[in-house]
Amino acid sequence: MLEKAQTDMYHTDFAVSLNNVTKTFTQWQRDNTGRGLIRNLIKPEKQTITALDDVSFNVRKGEIVAYAGPNGAGKSTTMKLIGGMLLPNSGDISVLSLSPQRQRRKLMQHLGILFGNRTELWWDHPIIQSFEWKKVVWGISDELYKENLAMVTELLDIGNLLKTFARELSLGQRMKADLAMMLLHSPQVIILDEPTLGLDVVAKRQMIDFLKRINRENGVTIIVTSHDMDDLEEMAERIFMISAGKLAFDGSFNDLRSITGNLTRVVVTMEKDFVPKVEGGSLLSSSNGVFEYDVDLHKIPVRELLSQLSTATGVQDVEIRKAPIEQVIAQLYKDWNSGKN
Amino acid sequence: MGVKLASKLKRMLGLFAISAKMDLVWLLRDTKFAIAAIAADAISNLSVVSSVYLIALRFGGIGGLSVDEVLFMMAYSTITTGLFILFGSANNIHISRIIGRGQLEHLFMQPLSLKAQLLTCGFAPFTGSGNFIIGCILMVISINRLNIEFSFWWIASLIIYVLTTMVIIVARAYLVSSAAFYAPVAAEEITSTAIDGTWQLSTFPLSGMPSFIQLSLITILPEGFMAWFPSLCLLGKPPLNLSEYYPLAYALILSLLASYIFRKGLNYYVRKGSNRYVPYGFRR
């Protein structure tokens, strides 16, 4: 039986597959007038929200995939569907060839879920006690537990936190402890919903490095959502973007940049009293002779841009770099809201 | 088959053991505070029991029950309250709190059935056994005073009735808690209201009440099963000319109804989800 289950589980290259998944919710609506209150008693007004509309995607084993979208786009709903916490209205979901809805218990032995705003730690116990609790509940063998405990303690640098009560931890420490606890059963797929929420630069750095390392060394598949696009770009090579319940983009971050017109930042340092002329670019800032422009390289080819700057007098230095991904995404959200694409 | 059952049993015992260990280390983290909490619990319960017992002493019994029979009923009530605290320390009986606060998702993340989690997660033998022990002591005293003939069958009956009362408490809690699937904020504390009401009436001997009240409290509401009806059955005088199996039938029907309604609510929850999430009260 066990052998059969394991064979079933490994027969595909996909860690996560969603096929034509639709998920709708009903929201109650009511205005604030007396008439609205009475109408609500007789015939309550309801609105159907389509959180996911016929969404399909596959995530290969060993991939890190970023999952992004504006507020209310359906990111957390997708995470909960993958984690078997919600049922789809239609469509199929498969995680490691298991159905999250029908084989939840078996799946949870191989899946790790972390919501940035929630904790699995026992509040009034030392961290190590929560870890021991997990060992029993997940039925983790002594050998695997020791091995994973040593690994997470070293990589996440939490040795000095193990005896500390969860209630005494800072947010960053708590997130590290939660992440460590999630990994104790060696999950093959992990789902992270806003894992860097509220973390400072150092804690964020450590978490990103750690996730990349377990992905590289242990082949763990990671699906991560965040509103911090720079974090996502640093972690993942592939990004899914969801908008109004539809999968609006599936590709690399470079592809994402190109669909918004190859936005580029050009920083020109000038000698005193000189101002550069960058035709077609929009000036973002200028200070102490340093001028920063937004340029769309689809509209102004880089050769033309350099030729403009090479003939200008007073140019000391030119730096061309990719626009921050935040700006690309913001442009994309704006386009989606205005009905483009 | 046998191996599978043994493995399941071992797993369940392991889960009870880890809950017990979490309880013990929690007790030992601040022993003074924990002892104070246990003592307060026991004193509060003894006060409830004493008030009725003192009235019985003053008037030589209540509603046709002798003082010792009242004491027996008090002991029964204390045992069931004790079991409630012993197995329900993680809001697993006050389930409307878990549902209303959107905390069921924590349970979905565990590789266990919901039943196994809810049965084992609230086991607190070190901080929650005070009432149960006091109840057992009171039971031994009352049995001695009543000169009850001790037999295997009588002990088995006592255990069956206590379990029946527990089934009724849990079934009722889960039945009313199902409202929290549909109205998480309004119904978050609905089990407290239901269970508190149950405790308040559970220690009162209903024998002196008009029969329509007695009947109401063993049909529409289950308060009569908390101590009064089963105690009288154990004393060999089932009230209202009803069969001594009536509590068992009531528990069966109520638990089937609760199971049906709760499953329906759970189905609604996994279809609709919960936008509400409140972290407090989950895992102490």
Image (spheres, grey):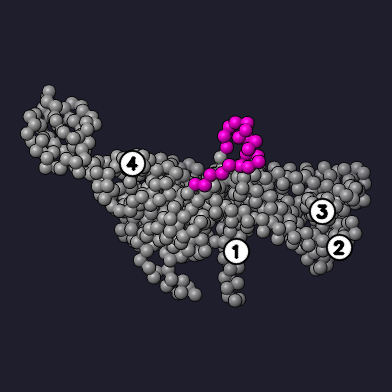
Does the magenta run of residues contain B216?
A: no
> Looking at the picture, does residue B7 appear above or below residue B97?
below
Amino acid type, mark 4: Asp
Residue at mark 2: chain: B
- What is the C-alpha distance between the residues marked 2 and 1? 36 Å
Which SS class for mark 2? loop
- What is the C-alpha distance between the residues marked 3 and 4? 65 Å
Amino acid type, mark 3: Ile
- What is the C-alpha distance between the residues marked 4 and 2? 74 Å
Residue wearing tag 3: B218
Which SS class for mark 4? helix
Dot in front, 3 or 1: 3
Q: Position of residue B186 (x, y in %)?
A: 63, 41
Residue wearing tag 4: A335
Amino acid type, mark 2: Ser
Characterize the local packing of mark 1: few (<14), some (14-19) or many (20 or more) Cα atoms within 10 angstroms: few
Labelled disc at residue B13: 1
Residue at mark 1: chain: B
Give the mark nearest the N terminus, 3 or 1.
Answer: 1
